[in-house]
Image (tube, grey):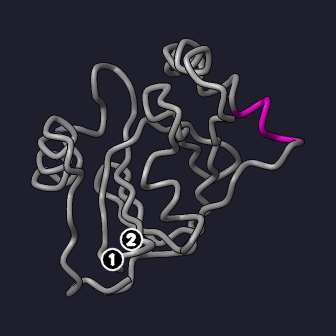
Amino acid sequence: MHEQDEVLDSPTGWVATHVRRYVASEGSKGHIWYGKPTLLLTTRGRSSGALRRTGLIYGEDQGNYVVVGSNGGSDHHPHWYLNLLAEPRVRVQVAADTFEAVAREAEEGERDRLWEAMTVIFPQYKSYRKKTDRKIPVVVLEPQGPAQG
């Protein structure tokens, strides 16, 4: 990912507002959102090739970051998740720190543990799971170093 590429923020109004506030304040406004830690995830659009950025609640595990593709319990995966399946190299911002990462779906041996940890952070994930028949993805973001400009 290159800095000169235009980054498109989430088309969801409140998410875009959150992301802009997060970026403008280098995470001092937005990193903690209603008491929950959030990061910014930038993926490359699987069809458009455009960089797309959204805000997500996260957890931490063994030096990695964990996010959940709940999409509010929708029957469809969120676009950011589908994008990282096509291109797992992503950019992450946690507070003022920005870095490259590789995204992967949690493996069966760790998925249940990470799911439980994420439902402690954001209990609504449990109700989202009841709303859909799809398996809600748990994604591990493995930092690869500072962002490249």
> Where's residue 52, x and y in %?
30, 64
Residue name at image x 54 percent, y 42 percent: 67
Which residue is the site of mark 2?
45
Q: Gap between marks 1 and 2, in whole Å?
A: 5 Å
Q: In the rendered image of this protein, does residue 78 appear above or below residue 123?
A: below
Label 2: few (<14), some or many (≥20) within 10 Å? Answer: some
Q: Is residue 81 magenta?
A: no
| Residue 91 picture quarter | bottom left
> Where's residue 45, x and y in %?
38, 71
Residue name at image x 36 percent, y 80 percent: 49
Q: Which residues are magenta?
A: 109-114
Task: Tell me the quarter of the image containing the N terminus.
Answer: bottom left
The answer to whether residue 100 is left or right of residue 53 is: right
Q: Is residue 113 magenta?
A: yes
Q: Are the two marked residues, 1 and 2, in contact with CB atoms closer than 8 angstroms?
A: yes
Residue name at image x 18 percent, y 77 percent: 6
For the residue marked with disc 1, what is the amino acid? Ser
Residue name at image x 36 percent, y 57 percent: 93
Of residues 78 and 118, which is closer to you in this image? 78
Label 1: few (<14), some or many (≥20) within 10 Å? Answer: few
Which residue is the site of mark 1?
48
Q: In the rendered image of this protein, does residue 77 appear above or below residue 144?
A: above
